[in-house]
Amino acid sequence: MPDPILVPAWEGGRLRPVEKLEVHRRGLRHKAVSVFVQRGGLTLIQQRAASKYHSPLQWANACCTHPLWGESGVDCAQRRLAEELGIEGLEMRPRPGVEYRAPVGDGLVEHEVVEVFVAEAPPGLEPRPAPAEVAATEWIAPDALRARIEAAPERFAPWLRIYMAEHRAAILGA
């Protein structure tokens, strides 16, 4: 059995390492990272794999994850972008952080303090998704993404709905 994944979470008024699933079961406030990858005015979205323990098959931004205990946000963003989508070497530009709390199904709650990064992909870059992480990817214009979310919000991860409704201009500049 692999070692549990420990993420930075606030418990009892202090930041400490807590097992990732336990963080979501208890709805603890914890650190997270979200990456938006843009290319020629489009943004990359991914459909989460069916095997994900929460929000399976919902569409999300390019990469959403939790830093490991002691890992910086930018290192986490680069690591998970490579692990999930096979994308490496992009410069991460920080955007204003976001904090949100949202149920994600099966009694689990995301209460995240998110470091947000945007990266510009070169022309022709295509993701190479890891099947255990990602079911599909798509490049989409921000206005088209907003329209899809409004038409069928249940198809999109709660955090992406929040980002697009409340933080779109700060993140995407659109």
Image (cartoon, rainbow, N blue to C red):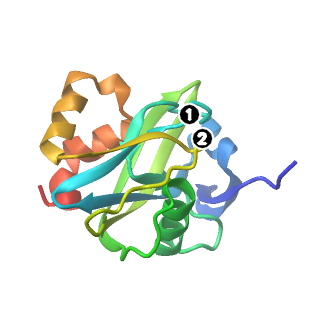
Using residue 121 as the reference point, say whether residue 18 is left or right of it.
right
In the rendered picture of this protein, how many numbered marks are placed on residues? 2
The percent coordinates of residue 44 (x first, y second) are 32, 51
Residue depicted at x 44% and y 54%: 63
Q: Amino acid at mark 1?
A: His
Q: Are marks 1 and 2 in contact (CB under 8 Å)?
A: yes
Using residue 14 as the reference point, say whether residue 116 is left or right of it.
left
* In the rendered image, the vertical position of residue 160 relative to residue 122, given as above or below: above
The percent coordinates of residue 124 (x first, y second) are 30, 62
Using residue 107 as the reference point, say whether residue 74 is left or right of it.
left
The residue labelled by disc 1 is 54
User: CA–CA distance between discs 1 and 2?
Assistant: 9 Å
The percent coordinates of residue 157 (x first, y second) are 40, 36
Numbered badge on residue 8 = none
The image quadrant where one finds the C terminus is bottom left
Mark 1 residue crowding within 10 angstroms, few (<14) / some (14–19) / many (20+): many
Q: Amino acid at mark 2?
A: His
| Residue 164, image quadrant | top left
First along the sequence among labels 1 and 2: 2
Front-lying residue, 105 or 23: 105
> Which of the two discs, 1 and 2, sits closer to the camera?
1
Residue depicted at x 44% and y 57%: 113
Numbered badge on residue 24 = 2
Q: Tell which residue pokes out farthest to the right in this image.
A: 1
| Residue 153, image quadrant | top left
Front-lying residue, 154 or 84: 84
Tell me the element at label 2: helix
